Amino acid sequence: MTTPTSTYRMKLVYLSNMFNHHQKPLADNLYKLLGDGNYYFVETQEMREEQKKLGYVQYNEPYILKLDIKTKNIIIKMISEFDVVICGEAPLSLVKERYKRNLLTFRDDECRYKGIIKYLKWPIYTLDSLMYNKGYLLSASAFGPVDYVLSGMKQNKIFRWGYFPEVCQFNIDDIFNKKKKNGIQQKVEVSIVWVGRLIGWKHPESTIYLARVLRSIGISHQIRIVGTGPKQKSIESLISKYHLEKNIVLEGAKSSDRVREYMLKSDIAIITSDRQEGWGAVVNETMNSACAVVACENIGAVPYLIKNNINGLTFKDCDWKTMTEQVLWLIEHPDKRMEMGINAYKTMVNIWNAEIASKNLLLLIEFLRNGKLLDLKEGPCSLAPIIFRKSKLGFRSI
């Protein structure tokens, strides 16, 4: 990477547990815009073995610092003296003094109360929030603002944010030719992709329900499951039990480039995680691959990225019947399926990507430093709306 020169007059440090490929495009853009020595990404933890097995790369970019005995004093000095600090999944203790001194500080967070354990720790999280409320929130989930407003943060301090994996620009005709060619090669009417770890709350079993229905009504199809995890054996057993070997292919763990190839060859992507999916970068990636996306509405990225019936379709938690009906509708309406895929692609290229997010962030910071509020209507760093999740029973919940 070439050493950039700054086009903005500020120093910014981002704190997180670890660096991965989903964060690299944004980090590269911030480094390019701010210049060498003005932007750093601090890793506070070592990468887990599970992530290494999934193909996560340990990067050595010039802006990455690892928090250890040798670097601790340097990093503490940066946190104290830099113009802006963004605190992601990192200890609050690192930024407490900044909050006490009312220095410009952002919290980058998905949801405060995503799981039952966090609900049980509500008093502790509320005490933390008293500190976070002194700064601003970059909400990497459409449902994060509710948690913070209920903890006392003013809504005008909360901005849309998220994860910004690589967004590729393609010739749109080439994408659909590739999808069509893949269908001909596989001798199927429609190609469907499911990507993620095979764990409970991502619900890979949804593919079994879908495949059984499609087969029962005579629709030739192939569902590719890309990923591994503890539920793999149970999925293999269900495939065998219902004789779905021709309809569902378990591809295993693949590199990010190979995963993207599966997406580019697929007509439809189903994203079936429940409310425990804080963001869900697979939503970004499948939309960028011009798939017609059918996704659970309680995934953190979905309300920000998907406009229902325009660039994708949404369903409630674990409502496989509705999900299947939506997939059927897309199969029966190929023109609409293509239209949604094109609109999804445009959403990523024109609005939700790392280049736009980095520029919007630095513009927001400049406005805030001048006591003003940036007036963006959509996309990263626009004011975040208050959105409640919908439970399976129809009640609205945090």
Image (spheres, rainbow, N blue to C red):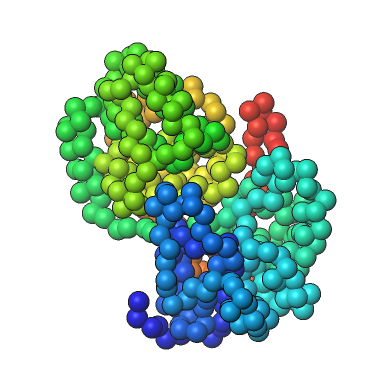
Residue ranking furthest to the top: 216
Compare residues 91 and 354 and report the one nearer the observer.
91
Q: Is residue 368 left or right of residue 127?
A: left
Q: Residue at x 67, y 26 (%)?
A: 393
User: Where 177 sits versus 3, above or below?
Assistant: above
Q: Quadrant of the N terminus?
A: bottom left
Q: Going 46% across and 25% down the picture, which residue do you hit?
A: 234
Tag count: 0
Q: Position of residue 269 (x, y in %)?
A: 38, 38
Q: In percent of the image, x 59 and y 66: which residue is there? A: 44
Q: Is residue 338 above or below residue 242?
A: below
- Residue 3 horizontal side relative to residue 368, left or right: left
Residue 51 in the figure: left or right of residue 287: right
Q: Quadrant of residue 87?
A: bottom right
* x then y, percent, for residue 178: 21, 43
Out of 283 and 48, give the one closest to the viewer: 48
Q: Residue 193: where, in percent of width, then height?
A: 35, 36
- In the depicted structure, whether residue 330 falls above or below residue 169: above
| Residue drawn where x is 31% and y is 53% of the image | 257
The answer to whether residue 92 shows anywhere in this view is yes
In terms of image quadrants, where is residue 371?
Answer: bottom right
Q: Is residue 284 visible?
A: no
Q: On the rendered image, what quadrant is the C terminus found in? A: top right
